[in-house]
């Protein structure tokens, strides 16, 4: 078969979203008895086969050790004088919400103060609670709105919690289960977006209305203050309570990438001219007269006689901007190899995280009365850097105003955490080692390299290879190719004890493809593979697979692919287009029926990425890659492992269910596993995750390991 050939139907199917012509539409009934009976039957088949594999039990034990290990670096968020962390391990599978001071966190074994025990709460209330986060009131950080989901779904219950009393507030703010958004206005007032009944949600299932809700009054009495449209993704509110800089912004998410904003001055709206696909933040702090607006561009912006390129980060005086001034300082402009990975602000500095050929570096910009002054930050390289400012803008004289947490990792280097100082005290360093995780696998002899494949249209596509000890380019390496390629999400190097123990130490090669549709080279890299050009993501992934085969890294007998969510769509499209390239496919919480994706759960919110199947012009290109619609009985496909979750209320489990049912109907071999809990992450606790991942690796070794007769 021609290397660049993509099978296409001669006449795309009609753009109909009804289920009338779909014999497997009944599997869209998430909790119906017949659908769950089908799920349990498939689960029993797959679990019986995969848990009996010799690899399963030891891998599951190894993964549990990794997931429950006590030497993980606790990820923290600052609230007032404390650093909060959600911790899960074998004794606390649902988690402990806990806190410590910075001085205590510095210790090798901090004495954590328990704020909320999720396991005890779940047992006392008879609910399968999964932590969904906490939203604190900036002026009184002990007041929190805690989100708890049943089984890990996106929809959550919201309950007011007092971190001083360490208990839920009696008769406090409470919202029933929904995909809600809540924003503090003051100690007694919220802006709430939730399911208020018919007409209150968008087609995507998110809030359309924002209401002002006062403590002590029923939710039904809350007053509507802002509305979006039904076809929007959502409506939301944001409130800045910083003394001297108080403001409220209401927003309509028109689609996944475009928004309209209304800036309020009391009850008076202020014109807020901004490119609809730009993102922004106000940068200020208590007692500071300077108010800076930071703008990140996703498209080129011609303004005031200048053109600022997509992917740039701009800074300007906020007050001047609101009166019409368009004078900017460019803090970052992309190049052919570099993109903006993010930024963080201390009191006087902007820390710019730059991705250069998929390796992170940092630039520091100091704000002065005369403008911005740049200098680099000396940090570990190459790998992935993450930055989180510790500055609390609500506090005058904040002792951590110029401090930040800096994390570093790469494929073979365990995570490390530094306390960064933009203005280090005399005798100290800019980066103070804070935490370092011990190695989770033996990396002796392992090596990483970056290569480039050439896609169908000539584009150079980078990918990373992690080689196990002693591996050679002899075409016999069990190789797992991973990708995502959507929504401007970058796949940067990461350290994985899971892959280390279950894959590298057993002789497996890992390949991570940085295909178009991702964000590795900024908005342009993403926008090159959306809508009518989505096929380019799949062409890039195929090109990487072909390059691996051509250069002797592996061959189809030993090559497997894996992807989740949009990455599940990626591997679904690729194995239906080029099945001869692969012998294993792990398709996780996937989109697969692209004719109906926009009608299922949050699917309508992704039409800016894929298009609208109801529009004939859009369906013409979607139809050519929709995996569910392009299955053919006469084709020979690798045996696929589909995994999903009943409680996934973002990507409907029917995508995986229907794909598996149709393949079975055609006589194609496959395995299917659906966790009854877990949400979009696939698992609700570490035990479930270890079980799922151990089955996935057992499947991969079954498919890709050495065989008695090892034919091409």
Image (cartoon, grey):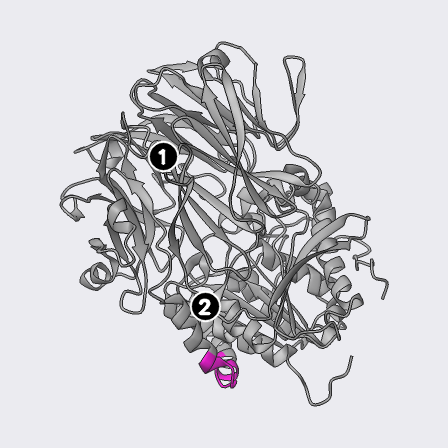
Q: In this view, does 455 lie to the left or right of 207?
A: right
User: Which quadrant of the figure has residue 325?
Assistant: top right
Taking 341 as reference, is 690 above or below it?
below
Residue 110's label in the rendered image is: none
Mark 2–mark 1 Cα distance, whole angstroms, equals: 36 Å
Please say whether residue 51 is one of the residues in the magenta stretch: yes
Nearer-N-terminus badge (2/1) = 1
Tell me the SS state at disc 2. loop
What residue do we see at 21% from left, 31% from top?
187
Q: Nearer the viewer, residue 264 or 515?
A: 515
Task: Name the residue carrying label 1.
Answer: 426
**Residue 623, can we see it?**
no
User: How far across and down, in percent of the image, does residue 205 sit?
Assistant: 45, 44
Give the residue displayed 41% in from the left and 68% down from the top.
Answer: 66
User: In the rendered picture of this protein, how many numbered marks are placed on residues?
Assistant: 2
Q: Mark 2 points at which residue?
A: 440
Badge 2 vs badge 1, beta-carbon distance below 8 Å: no
Few, some or many residues within 10 Å of mark 2 (<14, 14–19, 20+): many
Q: In which quarter of the image is the N terminus?
A: bottom right
**Residue most toward the bottom?**
708
Expressed as whole percent of the image width and height from the top left, the position of residue 396 reads 27, 25
**Magenta-drawn stretch contains 225:** no
The range drawn in magenta is: 47-58
Judge left or right: residue 120 versus residue 344.
left
Percent from the top left, x then y, of residue 356?
63, 43
User: Where is residue 694 drawn, in percent x and y?
Assistant: 48, 74
């Amino acid at each position: 078969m021609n290397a660049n050939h993509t099978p296409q139907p001669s006449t795309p199917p009609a753009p109909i979203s009804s289920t009338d012509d779909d014999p497997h539409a009944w599997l869209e009934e998430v909790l119906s008895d017949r659908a769950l009976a089908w799920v349990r039957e498939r689960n029993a088949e797959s679990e019986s086969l995969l848990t009996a594999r010799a690899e399963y039990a030891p891998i599951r034990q190894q993964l549990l050790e990794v997931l429950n290990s006590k030497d993980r670096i606790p990820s923290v968020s600052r609230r007032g004088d404390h650093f909060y962390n959600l911790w899960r391990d074998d004794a606390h599978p649902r988690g402990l919400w806990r806190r410590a001071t910075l001085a205590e966190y510095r210790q090798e074994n901090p004495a954590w103060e328990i704020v909320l025990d999720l396991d005890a709460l779940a047992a006392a209330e008879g609910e399968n609670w999964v932590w969904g986060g906490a939203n604190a009131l900036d002026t009184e950080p002990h007041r929190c709105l805690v989100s708890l989901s049943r089984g890990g779904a996106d929809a959550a219950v919201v309950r007011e919690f007092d971190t001083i009393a360490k208990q839920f507030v009696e008769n406090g703010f409470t919202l029933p289960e929904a995909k809600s958004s809540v924003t503090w206005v003051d100690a007694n007032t919220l802006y709430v977006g939730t399911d208020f009944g018919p007409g209150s949600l968008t087609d995507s299932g998110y809030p359309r209305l924002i209401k002002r809700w006062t403590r002590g009054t029923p939710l039904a009495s809350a007053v509507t203050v802002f509305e979006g449209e039904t076809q929007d993704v959502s409506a939301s509110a944001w409130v800045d309570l910083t003394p001297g800089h108080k403001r409220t912004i209401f927003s309509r998410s028109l689609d996944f990438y475009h928004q309209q904003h209304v800036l309020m001055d009391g009850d008076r709206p202020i014109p807020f001219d901004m490119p609809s696909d730009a993102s922004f933040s106000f940068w200020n702090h208590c007692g500071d007269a300077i108010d800076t607006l930071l703008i990140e561009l996703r498209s080129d912006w011609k303004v005031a006689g200048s053109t600022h390129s997509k992917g740039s980060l701009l800074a300007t005086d906020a007050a001047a901007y609101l009166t019409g001034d368009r004078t900017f300082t460019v803090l970052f402009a992309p190049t052919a190899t570099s993109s903006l990975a993010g930024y963080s602000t201390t009191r006087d500095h902007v820390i710019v995280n730059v991705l250069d050929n998929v390796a992170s570096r940092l630039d520091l910009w100091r704000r002065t009365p005369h403008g911005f002054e740049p200098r680099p930050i000396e940090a570990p390289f190459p790998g992935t850097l993450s930055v989180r400012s510790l500055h609390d803008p609500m506090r005058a004289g904040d002792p951590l105003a110029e401090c930040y947490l800096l994390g570093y990792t790469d494929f073979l280097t365990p995570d490390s955490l530094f306390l960064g100082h933009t203005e280090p005290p005399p005798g100290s360093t800019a980066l103070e080692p804070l935490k370092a995780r011990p190695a989770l696998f033996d990396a002796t002899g392992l090596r990483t390299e970056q290569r480039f494949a050439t896609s169908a249209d000539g584009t150079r596509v980078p990918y990373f290879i992690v080689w196990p000890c002693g591996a050679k380019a002899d075409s016999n390496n069990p190789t797992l190719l991973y990708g995502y390629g959507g929504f401007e999400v970058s796949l940067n190097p990461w350290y994985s004890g899971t892959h280390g123990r279950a894959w590298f130490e057993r002789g497996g090669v890992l390949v991570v493809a940085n295909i178009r549709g991702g964000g590795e080279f900024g908005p342009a890299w993403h926008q090159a593979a959306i809508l009518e050009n989505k096929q380019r993501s799949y062409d890039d992934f195929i090109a990487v697979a072909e390059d691996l085969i051509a250069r002797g890294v592996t061959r189809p007998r030993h090559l497997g692919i894996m992807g989740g969510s949009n990455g599940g769509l990626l591997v679904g499209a690729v194995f239906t287009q080029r099945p001869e390239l692969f012998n294993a496919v792990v398709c996780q919480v996937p989109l697969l029926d692209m004719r109906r994706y926009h009608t299922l759960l949050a699917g309508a919110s992704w039409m800016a990425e894929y298009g609208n199947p109801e529009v004939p012009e859009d369906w013409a290109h979607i139809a050519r890659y929709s995996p569910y619609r392009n299955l053919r009985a006469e084709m020979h496909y690798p045996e696929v492992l589909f995994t999903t979750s009943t409680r996934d209320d973002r990507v409907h489990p029917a995508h995986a269910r229907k794909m598996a049912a149709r393949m079975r109907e055609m006589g194609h071999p496959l395995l299917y596993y659906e966790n009854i809990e877990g949400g979009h992450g696939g698992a609700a606790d570490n035990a479930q995750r270890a079980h799922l991942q151990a089955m996935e690796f057992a499947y991969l070794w079954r498919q890709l390991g050495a065989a008695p007769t090892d034919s091409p």
